[in-house]
Image (tube, rainbow, N blue to C red):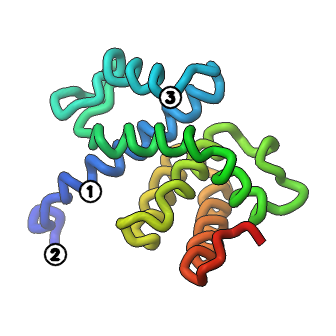
Amino acid sequence: MTATNAPAANPTRRSRTIARVAAVQALFQCEQSGDTAETVISQFIRHRRISSTASFDDGHIPDADLKLFQEIVLGVTRRQDDIDAKLSNVLPEQWPLPRLDPVLRALLRAAVFEIGTDTPDRIIINEYLDVAHGFFSGDEPKMVNGILDTLSHRANDGNDGNV
């Protein structure tokens, strides 16, 4: 199939991917600024123009699934202690959570929040691998894959990762 015959990208999937990228950015901002999730969400909506009519020009975030964006940011901040405990249980001892790059930390927190939801884990893992490739060019995407795969298997085995 040639590029001209390829089916159009699924706009729903794209809007969800964009929402996940924006959520990682918002979670990073929450951690760096100390602002609440509600404040950062409001700033993103007002100043970054998260909507279906915005464009990437000037830092705007077009076509994001606003509901998913809010759900991730609020959910991660509300469950951060539980999420961090799960992550700490799978990170190598020499790489504790505070040592990770703050963008990587935000990305992992968002992904862990979504694992075990109605969306199949394999889709969540693939989505966050795509997000990781957008932020990092080194080994970080491999690390994201390994961590999320381990947590997914633990969740599916009935073990919540707190062994």
Image disc number at residue 13: 1
**Which one is closest to the eye, mark 3 or mark 1?**
3
Q: Quadrant of residue 9?
A: bottom left
Residue sitting at x 62%, y 60%: 144
Left or right of 159? Residue 95 is: right
Mark 3 secondary-structure assignment: helix
Q: Which residue is mark 2?
A: 1
- The 10 Å Cα crowd at callout 2, few under 14, some 14 to 19, many 20 or more, is few
What is the x, y in percent for residue 60?
32, 25
Q: CA distance from mark 3 to mark 2?
A: 44 Å
Check disc 3 and give the amino acid type.
Ala
Which quadrant of the figure contains the C terminus?
bottom right
From this viewpoint, which residue is outermost toward the bottom?
Answer: 157
What is the x, y in percent for residue 33?
62, 19
Q: CA distance from mark 3 to mark 1?
A: 24 Å
Q: Give whichever of 39, 92 is nearer the camera.
A: 39
Mark 2 secondary-structure assignment: loop
Q: Quadrant of residue 35?
A: top right
